[in-house]
Image (tube, rainbow, N blue to C red):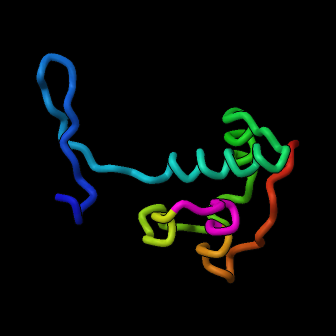
């Protein structure tokens, strides 16, 4: 189960849930933390708005890629992990 990224989570009333761990939100949280440390305190609403207004399918990353497992500064790791041909490597700006 570990290699498949699956887990059992204890719940209320002694029940257990069978789950697949998903890394995507953790990456957003890590990027947000980095930007806050750089003086750019984006709210989650602002990040959602920027994502919604971005060109769709411009870049792809695999959030389960081993590159993301050690702690790191996420924005450059994400930029370097996306396919170079599709990645413009730009920092988000408020709109």
Q: Is residue 7 left or right of residue 77?
A: left
Q: Quadrant of residue 87?
A: bottom right
Q: Which quadrant holds the N terminus?
A: bottom left
| Residue 69 within the magenta-colored segment of the rendering | no
Residue drawn 49% across the image and 52% down it: 24
Q: Nearer the viewer, residue 51 or 22?
A: 22
Q: How many discs mark residues in the rendered view?
A: 0
Q: Is residue 31 above or below residue 68?
A: above
Query: Looking at this rendering, what residue extends furthest in the top direction?
Result: 13
Give residue 70's position: percent from left, percent from top. Answer: 49, 65
Front-most of 53 and 89?
A: 89
Part of the protein shown in magenta: 71-78
Residue 90 falls left or right of residue 12: right
Asked whether residue 74 is drawn in magenta, I would say yes
- Is 27 placed above or below 12 here? below
24 shown above or below 9: below
Q: Residue furthest bottom?
A: 85
Q: Position of residue 75 (x, y in %)?
A: 68, 61
Instruction: Identify the residue at image location x=81%, y=59%.
Output: 91
Query: What residue is at 77 percent from the left and 47 percent from the top?
Result: 37
Quarter of the image with the C terminus in it: top right
Q: What residue is drawn where x is 85% and y is 44%?
A: 39
Frontmost residue, 19 versus 29: 29
Q: Quadrant of residue 48?
A: top right
* Residue 50 horizontal side relative to residue 6, left or right: right
Position above or below: 89 against 11: below
């Amino acid at each position: 189960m570990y290699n498949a990224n699956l887990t059992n989570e204890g719940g209320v009333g002694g029940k257990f849930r069978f789950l697949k761990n998903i890394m995507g939100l953790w990456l957003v949280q890590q990027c947000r933390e980095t930007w806050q440390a750089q003086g750019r305190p984006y709210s989650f609403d602002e990040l959602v708005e920027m994502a919604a207004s971005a060109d769709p399918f411009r870049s792809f990353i695999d959030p389960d890629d081993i590159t993301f497992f050690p702690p790191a500064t996420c924005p450059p790791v994400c930029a370097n992990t996306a396919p170079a041909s599709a990645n413009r490597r730009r920092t988000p700006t408020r709109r």
